[in-house]
Image (cartoon, helix red, strand yellow):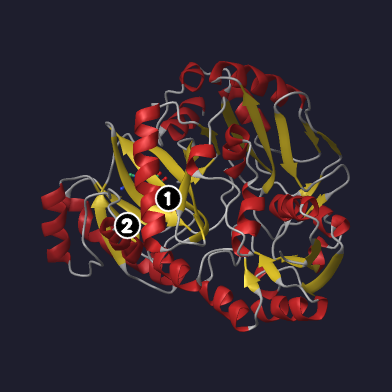
């Protein structure tokens, strides 16, 4: 087991990982920018190292500084959290070259899944169902027209290097195709330094369902069921729930089994999430994330298993603490992302939190790094915390969520809490009857 883990992240996820390390009796080092000197993860860690000024590229994305911090403190492993360097293959390779364990999969697996065209090809080869579309990058208008006509409109043009919901353009008819292809490719080049794009069928009413998987490091793969993250705005998740209201036990076991086998065949090690769109009873792979996911706590709530403990165990060579047959699903869990944003316009609302009071009681978990008097720096993403609620079934979970949202107080800044308070009273949400476009339609109606 590791002696000392360096946490290369900030905010709620840095604290989340720190908690797991403490429970396992592992020393912690955190790195931080000058803007985060007062952050909770810095206060609670055994050691902290300031690695640079506020902009992420000079601090949380600065590989040299982070490796130097490992060497100075004698950390033998790095947990990257999500975002920042968590899916950076070069970072994983550099750590390996320094004999520091990257708590995540190999650089090669990160590379395959980070290139969406390669990821889709790999998924197909492993027997995972994919969205119909081009078999690789598309550059030529004529080829694009041929493929689009073959799969049928509407189609979506996606950047191979895309992420965070960016680099996608929909073409409803052939008339839109030329412009969509051109803008997607230009935007991808500017945003990701790679203008490769591909075409797939645009699904009109899908749910976003993602399967939590783990490779144990010894060639075995397991799944921890699915999360439904269909509540989205601009392809960004508002939270998630587990299990999905749309799946039955048989469908869960089928898609879970396919994913677990694929992970084993790939020789993948550590946590991963295989994302699907689900429509008319069919699953369509869209991408795989090779890291811990923001919504992982709903899976923890219904399985009772600490996924960060498992990540650390696997990375240290100790394998998983559970086998597939030990993973049981108990009740229902919902997570809401609490962002420092205007709940209608979603413009960021940094500033000082004058009062912060979190709900409590049975089935409530709040993962957050903020506190009363905390000043939210303007440099990073707007997630200030996550509310995770667990109940014996979805109805109880929703009742508890409504109560918890009423108790939650964040003063001094705007947050997305009022939006969730409205949503828990909505009949479609209460019935679990929503697809990936539901939230945007709801927001447009409310305007
Ligand atoms: P990113 O890596 O940017 O998150 P994804 O491929 O995971 O990109 O897609 C993000 C979201 O975009 C999905 O959850 C879904 O809302 C939408 N999307 C992606 N592909 C399709 C598709 N073929 N049809 C309809 N919506 C799609």
- Pick the front one: 93 or 49: 93
- At which x and y percent is residue 182? 28, 65
Mark 1–mark 2 distance (CA, rounded to whole Å): 9 Å
Side (left or right) of 226 relative to 79: left
Give x and y (percent) for residue 389.
65, 29
Residue 447 in the figure: left or right of residue 143:
right
Image position of 371 (left or right of 183): right
Q: Quadrant of the N terminus?
A: bottom right
Q: Nearer the viewer, residue 215 or 141?
A: 215
- Residue receiving disc 2: 123
Q: Residue at x 33, y 58 (%)?
A: 158
- The image quadrant that residue 363 belongs to is top right
Q: Is residue 321 visible?
A: yes
Asked if marks 1 and 2 touch (Cβ < 8 Å), the reply is yes
Please name whichever residue, 348 or 8, is drawn nearer the observer in this view of the structure.
8
Q: Give residue 113's mark.
A: none
Q: Position of residue 11 (x, y in %)?
A: 73, 53
Label 1 within 8 A of ligand 1 by Cβ: no
Which residue is at a point 59% across and 30% down the rendered structure image? 333
Q: Identify the residue at horizontal 74%, vertical 23% (top origin).
A: 362
Q: Secondary structure at mark 2?
A: helix
**Element at label 1:** strand
Q: Which residue is mark 1?
A: 274
Q: Residues within 10 Å of mark 2 (few under 14, many from 20)?
A: many
Is the residue marked by circle 1 packed among few (<14), some (14-19), or many (20+) residues within 10 Å?
A: many
């Amino acid at each position: 087991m590791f002696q000392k883990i360096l946490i290369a992240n900030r905010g709620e996820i840095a604290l989340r990982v720190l908690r797991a390390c403490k429970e396992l009796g592992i020393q912690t080092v955190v790195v931080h920018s000058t803007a985060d000197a007062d952050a909770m993860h810095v206060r609670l860690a055994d050691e902290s190292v300031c690695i640079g000024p506020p902009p992420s590229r000079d601090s949380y994305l600065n590989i040299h500084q982070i490796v130097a911090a490992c060497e100075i403190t004698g950390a033998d492993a790095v947990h990257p959290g999500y975002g920042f360097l968590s899916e950076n293959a070069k970072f994983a390779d550099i750590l390996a070259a320094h004999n520091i364990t990257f708590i995540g999969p190999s650089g090669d697996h990160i590379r395959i899944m980070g290139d969406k065209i390669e990821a889709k090809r790999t998924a197909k080869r492993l027997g995972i169902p994919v969205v119909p579309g081009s078999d690789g990058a598309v550059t030529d208008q004529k080829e694009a027209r041929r493929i689009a006509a073959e799969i049928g409109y509407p189609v979506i043009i996606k950047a191979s290097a895309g992420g965070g919901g960016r680099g996608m353009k929909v073409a409803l008819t052939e008339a839109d195709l030329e412009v969509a292809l051109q803008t997607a490719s230009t935007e991808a080049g500017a945003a990701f330094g790679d203008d490769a794009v591909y075409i797939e069928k645009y699904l009109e009413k899908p749910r976003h369902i993602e399967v939590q998987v783990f490779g144990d490091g010894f060639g075995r793969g397991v799944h921890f069921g699915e999360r439904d993250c269909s509540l989205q705005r601009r392809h960004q998740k508002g939270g998630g729930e587990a299990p999905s209201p749309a799946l039955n036990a048989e469908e869960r076991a089928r898609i879970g089994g396919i994913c677990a086998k694929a992970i084993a065949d790939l020789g993948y090690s550590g946590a991963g999430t295989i994302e699907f769109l689900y429509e008319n009873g069919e699953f369509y792979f869209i991408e795989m994330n090779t890291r811990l996911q923001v919504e992982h706590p709903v899976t923890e709530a219904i399985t009772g298993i600490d996924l960060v403990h498992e990540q650390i165990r696997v990375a240290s060579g100790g394998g998983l603490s559970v086998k597939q047959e030990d993973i049981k699903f108990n009740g229902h869990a919902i997570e809401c992302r609490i962002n420092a944003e205007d709940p209608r316009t979603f413009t960021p609302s940094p500033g000082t939190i004058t009062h912060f009071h979190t709900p409590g009681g049975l089935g409530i978990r709040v993962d957050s790094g903020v506190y009363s008097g905390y000043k939210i720096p303007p440099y990073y993403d707007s997630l200030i915390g996550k509310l995770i609620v667990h109940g014996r079934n979805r109805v109880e979970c929703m009742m508890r969520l409504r109560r918890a949202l009423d108790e939650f107080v964040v003063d001094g800044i705007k947050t997305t809490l009022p939006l969730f308070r409205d949503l828990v009273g909505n009949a479609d949400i209460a019935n679990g009857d929503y697809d990936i476009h539901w939230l945007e339609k709801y927001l447009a109606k409310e305007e």
